[in-house]
Image (spheres, helix red, strand yellow):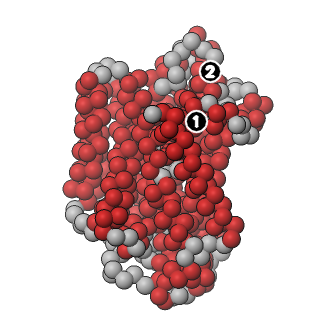
């Protein structure tokens, strides 16, 4: 156990917050769970960022409720993988990026770093476009100016960090609750076909045989199972102070961290389902364009489309939730970027500089695209959807090492994956790789 837990590099993941939160030793179940509640919320935010919004809304608008089965399956796989990532960090005292770099050659490690950084950029693109469009909807700010404003959110995490990590967790939980309530209310008003909704959670072969549907399905997978969230989960699971030489302490940390993660990801699953249901209820079978952010914003205030429920308040709530989602997602993107940069290439730099560098890389292509297609949010949202498909393609490069490491008895000791986890994760990874190869073949 000692060899498995020893951090040979001497560098803790997210050193400034690693082991910074104390947990009770002999408390009740609910008090202990409360102490471990928080990291799951930061993970869940990444599963309901603007990238999820556009893929889920578009999925409902184009194919009604069929892709609900993809959201369900993706969410279950996400719960499995995130629990594995958390366990990896708790047991070894290292995050996924550190372990991958330690166990690969310098060349392979560099390639994996580039792919992961591109995935971070793809995630940032979703946040930038979503926030930029939200600012235009709320304040009529030109989309190009809105994109530039989002580049300044580098200051957000710096301010929040000074409040303490526990307070950051509380803020994120609050934002998730707001988003959940907004869309639960709007779906209730839209009166979807409940029978079709339930049927939508049953998989159909049409998803694989229909290329446009498969493309969007993989976009949903990429938006739901986020590569950077696996790195983040393996790191922030270490924010609780535990004795890694004590198996009981480690087992308790794994148990409660997994419960927290699954509860928060269940909420993310509900939010993503609500988005798809809302897109289907409002746009499927209509003459409206594919359910884009602007479409949904306008529809919520148009009685000819949504009937008596139309209200400027609903439109504003939608835009506020979109802005909150985009901005809160920057926290997870910032932390994941730091984890990846320090883990893969051992580059330590001030948080503000790292965030500014990452955001500039992301803003530049979006800004160029926005200038070329000035005034066309539809074009920008196409770029957003493509970014989510790229995330799906990049996902195996994070999942494969995660499965290998958590199956390694020398590394994990008695906490290695059980047989069912090993095979479930392996099968999910293989299926995902096959679907991605098929998608690329069909596109090109």
Residue that badge 2 annotates: 284
Q: Residue at x 37, y 34 (%)?
A: 129
Q: Residue at x 41, y 68 (%)?
A: 100
Q: Earlier in the sequence, mark 2 or mark 1?
A: 1
- Of residues 71 and 317, the one drawn nearer to the viewer in this rendering: 71
Name the secondary structure under disc 2: loop
Residue 190 location, quadrant = top right
- In the image, residue 429 lies at what x, y percent? 57, 56
Q: Residue at x 55, y 61 (%)?
A: 82
Q: Is residue 147 visible?
A: no
- In the image, residue 427 lies at what x, y percent? 63, 58
154 up-or-down from 187: above or below:
below
- Of residues 183 and 364, the one drawn nearer to the viewer in this rendering: 364
Q: Is residue 291 visible?
A: yes
- Of residues 139 and 385, the one drawn nearer to the viewer in this rendering: 385
For the C terminus, the quadrant is top left
In the picture, measured across the screen, residue 428 lies left or right of residue 2, that is: right
Crowdedness near tag 2: few (<14), some (14–19) or many (≥20) residues, C-alpha within 10 Å: many
Label 2 to label 1: alpha-carbon separation: 18 Å
Q: Residue at x 31, y 50 (%)?
A: 156
In the picture, the disc for residue 214 is: 1
- In the image, residue 265 lies at what x, y percent? 58, 53
- In the image, residue 414 lies at what x, y percent? 61, 82
Crowdedness near tag 1: few (<14), some (14–19) or many (≥20) residues, C-alpha within 10 Å: many
In the picture, measured across the screen, residue 21 lies left or right of residue 404, that is: left
Residue 221 location, quadrant = top right
């Amino acid at each position: 156990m000692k060899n498995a837990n020893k951090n040979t590099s001497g560098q803790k993941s997210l050193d400034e917050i690693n082991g910074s939160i104390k947990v009770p030793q002999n408390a009740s179940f609910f008090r202990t769970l409360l102490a471990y509640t928080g990291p799951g919320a930061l993970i869940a935010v990444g599963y309901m960022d603007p990238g999820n919004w556009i893929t889920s809304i578009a999925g409902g608008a184009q194919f009604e409720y069929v892709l609900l089965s993809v959201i369900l399956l993706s969410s279950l796989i996400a719960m499995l993988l995130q629990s594995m990532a958390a366990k990896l960090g708790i047991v070894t005292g290292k995050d996924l990026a550190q372990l991958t770099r330690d166990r690969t050659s310098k060349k392979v490690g560099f390639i994996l770093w580039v792919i992961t950084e591109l995935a971070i950029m793809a995630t940032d693109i979703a946040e930038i476009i979503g926030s930029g469009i939200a600012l235009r909807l709320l304040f009529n700010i030109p989309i190009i100016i809105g994109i530039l404003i989002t580049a300044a959110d580098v200051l957000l995490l710096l301010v929040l960090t000074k409040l303490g990590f526990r307070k950051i967790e509380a803020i994120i939980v609050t934002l998730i609750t707001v988003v959940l309530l907004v869309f639960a209310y709007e779906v209730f008003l839209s009166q979807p076909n409940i029978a079709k909704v339930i049927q939508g959670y049953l998989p159909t072969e049409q998803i694989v045989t229909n290329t446009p549907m498969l493309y969007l399905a993989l976009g949903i997978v990429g938006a739901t199972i986020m590569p950077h969230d696996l790195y983040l989960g393996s790191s922030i699971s270490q924010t609780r102070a535990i004795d890694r030489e004590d198996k009981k302490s480690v087992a308790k940390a794994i148990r409660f961290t997994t419960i927290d993660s699954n509860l928060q990801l269940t909420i993310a699953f509900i939010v993503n389902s609500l988005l798809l249901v809302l897109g289907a209820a409002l746009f499927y079978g209509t003459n409206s364009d594919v359910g884009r952010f602007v479409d949904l914003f306008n529809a919520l205030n148009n009685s000819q489309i949504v009937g008596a429920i139309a209200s400027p308040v609903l439109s504003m709530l939608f835009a506020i939730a979109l802005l909150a989602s985009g901005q809160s997602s920057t926290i997870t993107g910032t932390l994941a970027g730091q984890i990846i940069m320090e883990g893969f290439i051992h580059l330590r730099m001030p948080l503000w500089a790292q965030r500014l560098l990452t955001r500039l890389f992301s803003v530049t292509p979006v800004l160029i695209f926005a200038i070329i297609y000035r005034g066309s949010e539809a074009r920008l949202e196409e770029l957003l959807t493509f970014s989510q498909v790229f995330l799906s393609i990049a996902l195996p490069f994070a999942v494969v090492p995660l499965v290998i490491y958590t199956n390694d008895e020398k590394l994990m000791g008695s906490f290695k994956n059980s047989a069912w986890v090993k095979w479930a994760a392996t099968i999910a990874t293989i299926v995902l790789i096959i679907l991605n190869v098929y998608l690329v073949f069909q596109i090109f």
